[in-house]
Image (cartoon, rainbow, N blue to C red):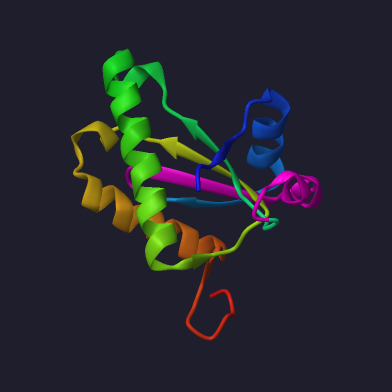
Amino acid sequence: MKHIAITENHLYSKVYTKGKKHVCKSVVAYALKDYHAKRLMKANPQKEYVNRVGLTVSKKLGGAVVRNKIKRVLREALRQIEKENQIEKGYLLVLVARAGCERKKSTEIKKELEKALLSIGLIKTGNGQAE
């Protein structure tokens, strides 16, 4: 399923200030419980909770082509993690690319993102509990 993008600036600010955060070498992950998750669940055709995802890539990392490539890699890494693990739903999730991210391979970024989501508590273990 496609992710719902975070489009409002105030939601980014809220996630940055109130959310849980984990810093890795190339990615910073922020997560905050979404207060409108129930409304989005009712609008969803499958009637299940979804995460809203926001990606931030600074102009310092490169031009538009480089920034869009980094966003594609981050989205795909998140998709792969969701496919392999059970991720908590109903959260605002902001992923911030850091310097050096453009030189890393997608598998390295996936490992770092998985570590960050595990640290925040969004990835459930096999027994249904978040680590």
Left or right? Give the position of 17 relative to 102.
Answer: right
Residues rendered magenta in the picture:
24-46
Left or right? Give the position of 65 relative to 6.
Answer: left
Left or right? Give the position of 122 relative to 8.
Answer: left
Give the image quarter of residue 128. Answer: bottom right
Q: Identify which residue is drawn at 72% across, 37% down.
A: 14
Instruction: Assess whether residue 37 is covered by the magenta stretch.
Output: yes
Is residue 24 visible in the rendered image? The answer is no
Judge by depth and name the residue closer to the eye, 91 or 98.
Answer: 91
Q: Position of residue 78 (x, y in %)?
A: 41, 50
Q: Identify which residue is drawn at 67% across, 49% down.
A: 45
Q: Is residue 2 above or below residue 116?
A: above
Give the image quarter of residue 36. Answer: top right
Q: Position of residue 130 (x, y in %)?
A: 57, 74
Q: Position of residue 58 (x, y in %)?
A: 41, 22
Q: Is residue 79 above or below residue 128?
A: above
